[in-house]
Image (tube, grey):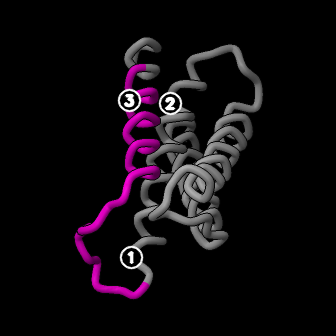
Amino acid sequence: MPKPIALILLLAYVVALTSLSLVNIHKMPSLGSSFDDKLYHLGAYTVFMLLGFNFFRQTQVKHKILISGTIIVLYGIIIEVLQQTLSTTRTLDAYDMLANFIGVVVGTIIIKLMVNLKLN
């Protein structure tokens, strides 16, 4: 994927994720568990990690996975703090941050598997 397209996809995802994270979402589809919200966080940050790495892999940056993951985890922490300070309907939740981190780890595992498959 060309670098400009990877950047546009990443930025569009960041804008969408930021918007959805800071507004009150009344009716998210149920996944049938008591921790649906955490599954949404995990999925969103897995995709975020894949998009972040997809952009950084086309740069001269060293440690692409580490840089991508660190930026995304920090973004998730900042969003949680902003939910607490800017929103009257959303609150900071440490379990959301944990789900975000796990999503980044899942994304990293997927990336490593994809890289290993391409090398073999």
Residue range in magenta is 8-34
Identify the residue position indicated by label 3 in the image.
12
Tell me: 110 left or right of 36: right
Q: Residue at x 38, y 27 (%)?
A: 9
Q: Can you see residue 29?
A: yes
In this rendered view, identify the residue nearer to me: 43 or 59: 43
Residue 99, how many percent across, how many down?
57, 67
Q: Can you see residue 108?
A: no
Identify the residue position indicated by label 1 in the image.
36
**Disc 2 from disc 1: Cα separation:** 27 Å
Up/down of 61 relative to 53, above or below: above
Within-10-Å neighbours for mark 1: few <14, some 14–19, many 20+: some
Tell me: 82 left or right of 27: right
Is residue 33 inside the magenta stretch?
yes
Q: Earlier in the sequence, mark 2 or mark 1?
A: 1
Tell me: 65 left or right of 45: right
Up/down of 78 relative to 12, above or below: below
Tell me, yes or no, whether the two marked residues, 2 and 3, touch with CB atoms within 8 Å.
Answer: no
**Disc 2 from disc 3: Cα separation:** 14 Å
Number of marks in the rendered image: 3
In this rendered view, identify the residue nearer to me: 34 or 116: 34
Q: Quadrant of residue 111?
A: top right
Q: Earlier in the sequence, mark 2 or mark 3?
A: 3
Within-10-Å neighbours for mark 2: few <14, some 14–19, many 20+: many
- Which residue sits furthest front? 88
Question: Mark 1 is on which residue type?
Answer: Asp
Identify the residue position indicated by label 2 in the image.
54
Is residue 100 inside the magenta stretch?
no
